[in-house]
Amino acid sequence: MLRAKATTTSRALLPARHQLLKKFRARTIRTSAVRLNGGAPFDPKAIERAEDEVDVCIVGGGPAGLSAAIRLKQLEREKGNEIRVVVLEKGSEIGSHVLSGAVIEPRALDELIPEWRTMADHPLTQPATSSKMLFLTKNMSLPIPHPPQMGNKGNYIVSLSQFTRWLAQVAENEYGVEIYPGFAGAQLLLSDSPDATDNWGRKVRSVRGVVTNEVGLTKEFRMKGSFEPGMAFRAKVTLLAEGAHGSLAKQAIQHYDLRREAEPQTYAIGLKEVWRVDPSQYNAGTVQHFLGWPLDSQTYGGGWVYHMDDGLVSLGLVVALDYKNPYMSPYRELQKMKHHPFFRALLEGGERVGYGARVLTEGGYQSLPKLAFPGGALLGCSAGVVNIAKIKGTHNAMKSGMLAAESAWEAVQAKAKNAEAAEAEEGGETTGPPTDMTGYDTAFHNSWVRDDLYEVRNLRPSFGTQLGIWGGIVYSGIDSLLLKGRVPWTFKHHRPANAADAMTDGTSSLDSALTERAEKHSPIEYPPFEPPLSTDLMTSVALTGTNHAEDQPVHLRVVKTRDFVRATQGLNGDGATVNAAVGAGVGAVRAEAEVGAATEADVEEERRRREEHVRVNVGEYAGLLERACPAGVYEYVDVEGEGSSEGTWNGKKLVINSQNCIHCKLCDIKVPTQDITWTVPEGSGGPKYTVT
Ligand SMILES: Cc1cc2nc3c(=O)[nH]c(=O)nc-3n(C[C@H](O)[C@H](O)[C@H](O)COP(=O)(O)OP(=O)(O)OC[C@H]3O[C@@H](n4cnc5c(N)ncnc54)[C@H](O)[C@@H]3O)c2cc1C
Ligand code: SF4
């Protein structure tokens, strides 16, 4: 079975899978026979998976996950007990899915690797030398006072993608962390029955690791000759470090109601380009932030320009996802921004070398969920640690990873020492009582990360009033210059009147609920593109190197998250129907019905959901996703006749060009119907960022 796996993986996946399989052969693992039924429908209940047992499984090889891995291995070195730490990363390489501004504070790095400045190949080669704030009108750029938090003395301008790659090398070469790119965490592995008490005193099943994605399914959920089931990584501690709006983190948040006492998370989309500018325009170390044009006064956001090392300039636009007008296109706003005289001068004679987009969390301190759940924890931007006044989250993400590592270390040691548990551990060390990570939550709230977020907690919500950007600028000016967060109040995030209906399960998005119907707005006329300064979307997407294997299940499921989790949870053995294809289309669910994993009622429900999606999104929101997705994935196309098997409304049907997806997660957050659930595609697909 393992040999079959090795010969059938995609080329991009091969090195990582070979490496893992070598380890598997060296270790005795519980494994199973895989039947290669070319063309047979996928039967989730008949699948037996290869399993591996680890102490700590970290999902996500970004700054948070890698910092956690390094810290765990440092503790191993300091204290002498061996600990097995595995990092799973969905990108084909570490860093290939990481996108950020990025000016970073080295505070956490100084704590994690104090000697980093003496390391020959570190990528923090460009210190920030100056920092300015400008207000743009259509033709002018006016200097405005710089809030103290936005000072960048001692900070560095980097490509976070490259920084993450370097951190992974340190983790692997210096500390022996096992890192597996091309492995996407697809499903939480839960205990068979309730064995833990959650934060709210409920008896719940605990997290016992993760299952990676199946590889080699067709779009219709049939097994190709190359089919391999996902692997089960059983772990004493599972750390979710997937970045903003992680797909497993979202499931954990729902499953353990981690947001019960928190404000909803709020988000922005950041679109980034990297340019090699004309030398006459290049000023290494310059940091500039912009407010105002092209965004209207009701939309929170702004632009940036960072002069990186080596003649490169990072520029981009952040647009808060609570924007009201469904006709808005964040991509077109970025292209328009470059038509400003300031940007024309900067980019004249330059060449664009990179493009990408990713959501970032904006909710801050009051939107932090409970960080621990039975058997694991949320790290970094999966919890939401961006200080939006600084537009920085990397330092907090790294520190949260380090703190989680320290608690995970204690938890693993305690488990090992627990003689009673050891006796009960007949099937291996990952059984027995679930690990308790609540110490991490406490440590986080006693750390400088909490202080960093607490001080600026009222700034972002102050922009949510009827006074729009002006109210926010005035309040934020006073707070950041004088009050510095030392006030007894904490603002809530702005809510729409229908928030109670919209926010029922802790995973539905406040930003989506704040979107207004198209009838309240007019279409926006954007200026024509002026290549090479501004280009159409597909020209930009080509720069991301995005690729997904052909004919695989659509990973953008048309189903609400809570329904997706309910339908797929049976994978973990609770006896529920296991409809792994839910949301992937009528054909996919029909294939599962052939093997009894879904019913004809599920097939009809799949069709009805799509029809309802099109009715609301086209009929009421003018097809918002067509403009909002920064990779052109969604289209509402004309079809002949009503009632197609895929679910049409008013002569329109939804087409999802999932192969273009750059994993930004916007659609899952902003779709007015809250019925797009982003799931992981086959590992190693997606963007291949190198300079973002
Ligand atoms: C446009 C923009 C500008 C920003 N500017 C700055 C800035 O200037 N300075 C700053 O400090 N911060 C900035 N930030 C924030 C910063 O990027 C984040 O705070 C930081 O990246 C968070 O680190 P993380 O490790 O939590 O998540 P990420 O960096 O997002 O890393 C998560 C990793 O997990 C992987 N992953 C996700 N799901 C899975 C899965 N299921 N299975 C396997 N792998 C998975 C991803 O592929 C990724 O590699 C910016 C963010 C954006 C979007
Ligand atoms: S499909 Fe969704 S996650 Fe993918 S690029 Fe578009 S908005 Fe982002």
Image (cartoon, grey):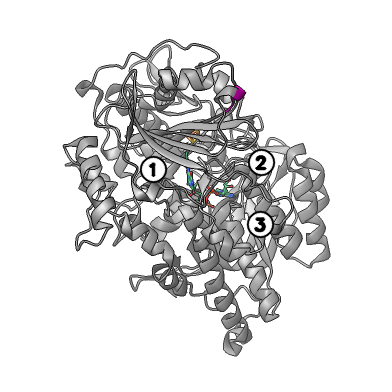
Q: Is residue 64 above or below residue 440?
A: above
> For mark 1, does the 10 Å Cα neighbourhood hold few (<14), some (14 to 19), or many (20 or more) residues?
many
Q: Is residue 96 above or below residue 380?
A: above
**Amino acid type, mark 2:** Ser
Q: Which residues are magenta?
A: 275-279
**Quarter holding residue 210:** bottom right
**Residue that numbered label 3 is attached to:** 117
> For mark 2, does the 10 Å Cα neighbourhood hold few (<14), some (14 to 19), or many (20 or more) residues?
many
In the image, residue 645 lies in the stretch drawn in magenta: no
The disc at residue 560 is 1
Q: Residue furthest bottom?
A: 419
Q: Is residue 151 above or below residue 27?
A: above
Residue 301 location (% of width, % of height)? 35, 35
Q: Earlier in the sequence, mark 3 or mark 2?
A: 3
Residue 328 location (% of width, % of height)? 34, 24
**Amino acid type, mark 3:** Arg
Q: Is residue 181 above or below residue 268?
A: below
Q: Earlier in the sequence, mark 3 or mark 1?
A: 3
**Amino acid type, mark 1:** Lys
Mark 1–mark 2 distance (CA, rounded to whole Å):
25 Å
- 2 vs 256, left or right, is right
- 556 vs 675, left or right, is right
Mark 3–mark 2 distance (CA, rounded to whole Å):
32 Å
Q: Earlier in the sequence, mark 1 or mark 2?
A: 1
